[in-house]
Image (cartoon, rainbow, N blue to C red):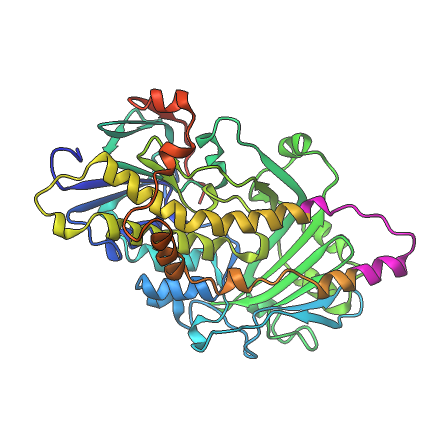
Amino acid sequence: MAAEDRSLRVLIAGAGIAGVAAAISLSRVSSAVSLDVQLYEQAPEPLEIGASIALSPNGMRTLEKLGVHKALSDEVGYRGPNGIPQIFRHWKTDQVISADTYTNVPNPRHRTTRFHRGHLHAALFEHVPSRFIHLGKRLTRAEANQNGVTLHFEDGSEAHGDILIGADGICSKSFVADYKLQFSGKVFMRSTFDDSLVEGKIPSLPTDSMHWWGPCDNFFASKLGKNQYTTVGAYDDPRTAEKFEKGISWDQSGDVNFLRGKYKNWNPTVRALTELTPYTNLFPNFAGDALPTWVFASRATLIGDAAHAHGGAFAAGGSLALDDALALGLAFRHVFKPSNSGQPFSLDDIRKALGLYSNTRQPHTARLLRIVHNQIEKRGVQFDSPGEEDAALVTRMRSRPNTEGLSEHDVEAAFVAALEQTGAAEAPDQSQALRSTDERADESRVTIQLKGSNL
């Protein structure tokens, strides 16, 4: 297709936040002529799971650059009144131990904002015409060769294009045959509900987002946009990853009494919040190693959790996905220039665009994954006394990793740096540089197994 005309068809596997943001970015940021973006989603309806999501300043700035202004409103998202991203309190005493701060966030609309995932998802979906969204399309496999890409669906249908973007979440490990996720040992018990269930019913309920840390378990609570509220309990699960995968699935209904029992000895505010939480769903926490490349068969790449399974650390997932989308659009605009009018886009052009996107985002996300795995490895330390354990907890809370590099990351500056690093004109071909000799030899036909996104 790309060799015959200037029209580029981009197939996006997964219509979650990452996939929809990628479609918006390619349509608005990129200036490629006749760009045709098609979204394929296994779910029958465009619905997000009933959990909360936080966007830090970088994510909010990217929403603005993508033109999703509705999500910046005070109605859809919630920003604490004191201008503090998050406050960390002691599990027993309720004492404030530490807090996140801003370094360079002059616009209040860019401050950390908390949403019901469904509301953010809906705000994004408004910017993608329904004719470009294909629901009920469960992907069985994808093929890529010198002539294009083909998606094969469970219903027997196919889709053909020039470029494939895997936005199918953490299950996209099948892009790399031996890729494995590591269970962090944590399970998140999440709930979102109408804030009337807690408002005025708990003395001195904080108006800012609060994160209580215990020796092993944590508890988070915050208002969300559209009069919603969220509670999240994170507890240690001693099972091995193999046993765990058989016992608990993603978004499985949990036992709210188990949640209450876990925090029955915590401070009165946390106990009251658990008593008023109406239900809970379970979300096991997994993280993966940094991938050696994000470019496959010169025509396929990854975005969002599919590219960097970081286990939700630092509530960075949504912002990372949005920044991925913006970087992808910037790379397309740089390579597929209107000045090339009349000339067909080549496989080399596609490879350069995806390589530039990868060079912009991979170093940043790899640093995050190193922090995540370092924290997983430090779990399970034993103490001789409760006092020693508590002192270690307070020290850990006060020496939390500095997240400014995540929360205020400038993806446009990173894109410019990637250009400068590669001679300001072309990004190196990571697809060629990092693939094995055997894989390059078989470039004429590459089959990639994908799973659809779970919304």
Residue at image position (61%, 63%) is: 402
Residue at image position (44%, 63%) is: 58
- Position of residue 115 relative to residue 359, above or below, is below
Is residue 69 visible in the rendered image? The answer is: yes
User: In the image, is 395 to the left or to the right of 193?
Assistant: right
Q: Is residue 76 magenta?
A: no
| Front one among 169 and 296 | 296
Span of residues in magenta = 376-392
* Residue 13 percent location from the top left of the image: 35, 39
* Residue 450 percent location from the top left of the image: 41, 31
Answer with the quarter of the image where residue 390 lies.
bottom right
User: In the image, is 330 to the left or to the right of 315?
Assistant: left
Number of numbered discs overlaid on the protein picture? 0
Answer with the quarter of the image where residue 376 lies.
top right
Residue at image position (70%, 63%) is: 399
The quarter of the image holding the N terminus is top left
The residue at the far front in this view is: 423
* Residue 240 percent location from the top left of the image: 70, 34
- Position of residue 186 relative to residue 92, above or below, is above
* Residue 400 percent location from the top left of the image: 67, 61
Is residue 17 visible in the rendered image? The answer is: no
Q: Is residue 378 magenta?
A: yes
